[in-house]
Image: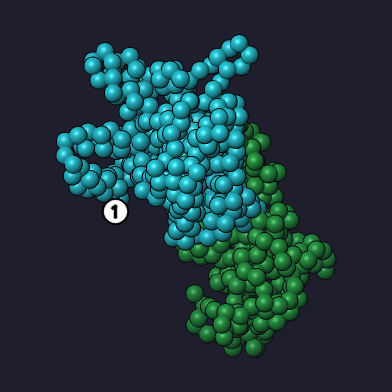
Chain colours: A green, B cyan
Amino acid sequence: MAEPLLVTRSLRKAFGGIIATDNLSLDVAAGEIHAVIGPNGAGKTTLVNLLSGQLRADAGDVEFDGAAITGLRPAARANLGLARSFQITSIFPDFSVHDNVALAVQARSGHSFRFWRPTRDDQSLRGPAGDVLARVGLEARGDILAGNLAHGEKRQLEIAMALATRPKMLLLDEPMAGMGVEESQRMVELLGELKADYTMLLIEHDMDAVFALADRITVLVYGRDIATGAPADIRADAQVREAYLGTAEVD
Amino acid sequence: MRGFFGKPTTWTTALLLVVFALMPIVAPAVGEAFYVDVFARIMIWSIAAVGLNLILGYGGMVSFGHAAYIGIGGYTVAIFGFHDINNGFIQWPVALAISGVAALVFGAISLRTRGVYFIMITLAFAQMVFFLGVSADKYGSNDGLNIWNRSDFSVGGLDLSIDDNLTFYYVIFALLLLVIYATRRIVNSRFGMVIQGARSNETRLQTVGVPTYLYRLTAFVISGVICGLAGVLQANFEKFVSPDMMDWPRSGELMFMVIMGGMGSLFGPVLGATAFLILSEVLSSITVHWHLIFGPLLILLVLYVRGGLTGLIEGRRGDG
């Protein structure tokens, strides 16, 4: 297996008495799609927030690309190449689709203390933004106000904004959340294409998608890793079946 | 993004600028010379409103204390004058610098808070400056301070005097245009996109790699300096400063001008300042109880017209 790109060691986060992340050690190898599944409330989104810096861990370490990033703020982590998407769509709703992506491109092209030149004439932003939009299939929607996109398109825009920061790794928090069957299918195809270029940590409830995409799967229950392994092994694991797959809790 | 040149707004803006430009000629001709002063004040408040709009409209930072920077700009000129330093090349840059430093300090602390706390803390800082003015016995305390000479701009043999009211009127007009143009460049620049992105979704902006705090603080400082400039002009125009110019109702009125005109539109604040001052002028000449009419008008506008007067002109209706 390739060198791990992302490593957590004994990561812990509690909200009051509820332990959302319990002594979690996992690693994501460069180039793999590592899925994290688990019932609602298992601490999946908390994990993403700990990795992206939205939340600070109570204990434990996060290493990315060989460097400790445990104490870094979200912006600093993004600049190291760790991009994320949100479970609840997080875009700039009053910007055009194109401006959403252009702003993400801008974020990774040096500081923004530039006060005079209009960004909308700036090919060094517009060009890459257009490329990314084409990659996720939104090239025809660039001029629309992002808030007016259909739900599935907003999810695509989320991915586009993450890609625009030229990341090494994507943290995807339920990219198919709220999508219909067809839209989900298209998202699976997109993520499959992106797999060639990016390492991903994928949180997802859609088991078809998870088993279609993942190289490895970690199962979280109450913040704890109860099993990690190849999809076939996870499917066969008795503990997992009992905790998760066998129940009707899959949404 | 909102366009700056939606058709009806373009015409309104153009018309308003023509009115500004011609007022000193037209008003005396129809025997209402008094309106030249009204419009000079309108333009000065417009500058301040454009400055506040940079953070309020574009940046989503609801500062309830921007009269402080007007006061600081004005008092700097007055205090220099009090000590017989009338040179404008000293007065103006120092006044703008002090406004900027004050905005840097107040902003650095205020911007660590959000929502109502931000509103309250900016108000608190402004009232601090207000009470500083009240307690400055040497500089007139509550009674204020007269300015005997306007800023002196003579270099060598050349005297670029602003003593003449007509000249000064056009200096204010030119500075207003300059401030609007600079704001237009800023909001469309990379910096401006970051400021608007932080208003729209700050968490998202941070997760694509922008440390938003520094940019918001910079915008706060620019905004403070623009209001400082308005204060410098106001002090020179009225030849008088008093703590009243930085009391909290002034901050509220400035906010109203921006909200009334249309937040986040380039000329909205100018429109708002104009409407606000003319309405209060006209209504107060009809009845002493003019606030009873003025207040409900403002409430109706805020309730029912999205985007203030700019929205009204563009035909945007409220959505609840």
Which of these two is toward me, A243 or B165? B165
Question: Is residue A173 at all visible to an observer of this figure?
Answer: yes
The residue under the point 50% across, 81% down is A249
Left or right of A95 on screen, residue A109:
right
The residue under the point 39% across, 50% down is B248
Give amino acid for label 1: Gly
Image quadrant in which you'd find residue B275: top left
Per the image, the residue denoted by label 1 is: B320
Q: Say above or below: B128 vs A245.
A: above
The residue under the point 64% across, 88% down is A239
Mark 1, residues whose alpha carbon is within 10 Å: few (<14), some, or many (≥20)?
few
What is the number of callouts on the image?
A: 1
Image quadrant in which you'd find residue B244: top left
Secondary structure of residue under mark 1: loop
Chain at tag 1: B
Farthest residue in the left direction? B287
Image quadrant in which you'd find residue B7: top left
Farthest residue in the front direction? B138
Residue B71 in the image, given as x and y percentages of width and height: 47, 42
* Quadrant into which the N terminus of chain A falls: bottom right
Which of these two is toward me, A21 or B19? B19
Residue A31 in the image, given as x and y percentages of width and height: 75, 61
Residue B2 in the image, given as x and y percentages of width and height: 44, 38
Question: Is residue B310 at all visible to an observer of this figure?
Answer: no
Residue B272 in the image, given as x and y percentages of width and height: 34, 37
The residue under the point 56% across, 21% down is B153
Q: Say above or below: B28 vs B268.
A: above
Which of these two is toward me, A53 or B70? B70
Q: Say above or below: B43 vs B257.
A: above
Q: Say above or below: B295 vs B76.
A: below
